[in-house]
Structure formats: structure tokens, C-alpha cells
Image (cartoon, rainbow, N blue to C red):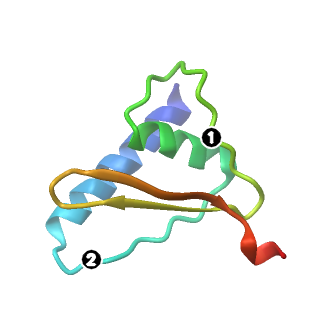
Amino acid sequence: MQFRARAEQFISKLFTTIHSEPDLKRVCIVSHGGMITMLFRSFLNLPYHTDIHIPTGDTGVHLWRYDRSGKKIIAATNLQGHLS
């Protein structure tokens, strides 16, 4: 639960920053798969206990969008083309 709480705190701070910095265009988050999974769950407002699994391979790239109206978009997940 503490792990999820850390993800929730980060997402909250990120959204606050997005709303307060109108010139902010992109944010890159580098983390391990476990935290990326928790960030996904927080981003999507999934319950703490869920049977939804979002795979994150080594160096997987995920592209999320959050517009200023509050719309959340997952544009890509677990891209690994850079490994070929």
C-alpha cells in the first residue's frame, strides 16, 4: 500500500505541475517496472487490488497524454523497438 501511495503522490504532483506550468510540453519518467505499473494504476484510477496487469519489459517505453481538460490518453505501451 505504501508503494501505491508513493505512485499516487507522484501522479498528484505531476498533474499539479502540468496545470501550473502552461509551457510544459513533455515529461520523461524513468523508473523500474514495478513503479511504472503502480503509476499506470494511479493514472487510470484503478483500485489498489486489481487483476489488470500491464506488462513492462526491460526498457519498455510508454506514452501517456494528459490534456489540460483532464482527458487521459494511453497512446502507446511497452514499446521496445529500440532493442532490435
The x and y percentages for residue 69 are 15, 55
Q: Height in image: 24 above or below 58?
A: below
Among the two numbered marks 1 and 2 on one chain, the one whose residue lies closer to the N terminus:
2
Q: Residue furthest right?
A: 84
User: Residue 71 versus residue 45: which sits nearer the camera?
Assistant: 71
The x and y percentages for residue 79 are 66, 64
Which residue is the site of mark 1? 54
User: Residue 3 versus residue 80: which sits nearer the camera?
Assistant: 80
Q: Which mark is residue 24?
A: 2
Pointer 1: residues within 10 angstroms few (<14), some, or many (20+)? some
- Dot 2 falls on a residue whose secondary structure is loop
Task: Judge left or right: residue 49 versus residue 79.
Answer: left
The x and y percentages for residue 2 are 51, 30
- The residue at 53%/18% (across/down) is 49
- Dot 1 falls on a residue whose secondary structure is loop
Q: Height in image: 65 above or below 39?
A: below
User: Residue 36 versus residue 81: which sits nearer the camera?
Assistant: 81
Task: Judge left or right: residue 58 versus residue 33.
Answer: right
Amino acid type, residue under disc 2 in the picture: Leu
The answer to whether the residue labelled 1 contacts the one labelled 2, judged by CB atoms less than 8 Å apart, is: no
Number of numbered markers: 2
Q: Height in image: 5 above or below 37?
A: above
Q: Which mark is residue 29?
A: none
- The residue at 32%/50% (across/down) is 72
- The residue at 42%/38% (across/down) is 42
Q: CA distance from mark 1 to mark 2?
A: 27 Å
The x and y percentages for residue 58 are 77, 59
Amino acid type, residue under disc 1 in the picture: Ile
